[in-house]
Structure formats: C-alpha cells, structure tokens
Amino acid sequence: MADVLENKRAATRFRILVEIADRQPAVSQGEIADAVGVTSQAVSEYIRELVDDALVEKEGRSRYRVTKEGVDWLLREATDVRRFADHVTDDILGSVGEDAAVATDRIAEGDAVTLSLVDGLLHATPGEAGPATGVATTDAEAGGDVGVTGFEGIIDLDPGSVTVLQVPPVRSGGSGAVDADALAAACADAGVVTASGVEAVVALDRAGVDPDTTFAAGEVAADAAGRGIDPVVVATADRVGRVTDALRDADASYEVTDAA
C-alpha cells in the first residue's frame, strides 16, 4: 500500500502539500483547512513540519512554495497511490466485478464462457475451453455485447510493442522531409496509429494514413500495447519525449526511429 494511505497523518500531510502546490505562493491556511477537513492550527503545524523537512520553503507572510524535494516527494507518493488504485481496480475489483465482452456466438445468461482478447477487445465464446473463463450475466447474439462475471484464469496475451516514428520539426524540413510511401508502409500493419504534432499529422495525411487519434498519442498507444496490439506513433521530434514518458509510465515496450 502507498505510504500516504498507511495512516491519517500521512494522508493529511500529502493533501496539504498538494494544496500548497496548487495555491502557491499566496497560501491561505484557512482555505487549506476547509479543503482538507482539519483546523487552521493543524494546517499551521503541518506546514511548519514541511518547512523543517525542506519540502516547503517560506517566502514571507502567508507565502509558501513547494521545493524541488517537495515536488519529487509528491510525484513518488502520487505514483504509489496510482499503482495501488490500479491494483485495486484491475486485480481485486476486476476479479469480482462485471465486464462487457463481444459475443462470438449466441450466449444465454448463466452460460459459461471462454474469454480472449481479439484486436484489443474482450471476447466471450460459449464453453469452458479456457484458460480464462467467466459466466455470462446477460443474453447476447453473435457480435453483440454480453456481460461477464466470475472471472477465473489468465487470458493468454503477449503485450504489443510500440514503434515511435520521429518527424523533423518544420524548421528542419517538417513533413516535407518524410518519405510518404515509406511512412505508409510502416503504418500499414499497425493495429493502432496515433499522431502527435502538426508536422506528424501532415506527414500522415500526405501518406494517406488517417490516425486513430491526434491527442494523448503516447497514452493511447500504451493502452493498445497492453491489449496485445502493436501500435505506431508518428510524432514531431519535440513531442517524442512526451510520448516516451507515457510509454515508460505504462511499462510499454517501444523503439524510436526516424520517419524521414
């Protein structure tokens, strides 16, 4: 479990530091007290401790700023909280909850089904062939959506790998420096194509490729890879870092090459 969830004091310390970061440099202890649900005196004591621990620096009366150490601490704790939340959602609730799947054949409520991932979507097939199974909670015709619960076993899945194709910025030739035919070929077999940056979008347009999204390109590609799809991200050079940050956060396998 994340440290900030271990006890109320740690959670309050985390929330107060978040509030300071959100309101800095002019910090109203009364407003923070209302937001967190503690007294102004308690906020004052917490802030004093944060200053002593070099997580916050005081710049004057009612003026505070989160230090680099404070930002690093917040990022670490926030990452732990997110991982814990993912664990609860995916590993705990996912095993007792209900999900939707695409029915591969006619299914009746109460039928045992075998689960698989096809093109990144959960599919349910009548029977218990396994290795992952469940129980239908609704009726469905072939191709329809069916509710599934009682998940058991593990879905056989090989995570995908992301290819990041880097397009030069406009000052270095932009989309005009990209071989449109080569780019089209590189995207031809991709299950998902995303784009980040104007030059990347224009390069894909010239190649006759319609990207699945031009927003949150790295996050979408990471999610697709986690579902067994091999995505391609076409990104302008100055946006590649944002894309790879999202892929690393998701522990997705990726390779960066030049599209030019």
Image (cartoon, rainbow, N blue to C red):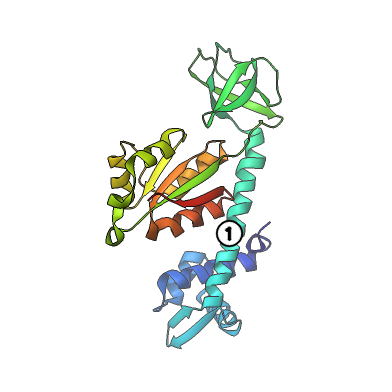
- The location of residue 211, given as percent across then percent down, is 36, 39
Left or right: 135, with 166 as reference point: right
The answer to whether residue 137 is above or below residue 64 is above
Task: Say which quarter of the image contains residue 156.
Answer: top right
Q: Is residue 148 visible?
A: yes
- The location of residue 169, given as percent across then percent down, is 32, 58
Tell me the SS state at disc 1.
helix
Q: Which residue is mark 1?
A: 79
Left or right: 232, with 76 as reference point: left
Task: Say which quarter of the image contains residue 97.
Answer: top right
- The location of residue 114, given as percent across then percent down, is 65, 21
The answer to whether residue 186 is above or below residue 5 is above
- The location of residue 247, given as percent across then percent down, is 52, 51
Q: Is residue 198 visible?
A: no
Picture quarter with the N terminus: bottom right
Residue drawn where x is 61% and y is 26% of the image:
116
Amino acid identity at mark 1? Thr
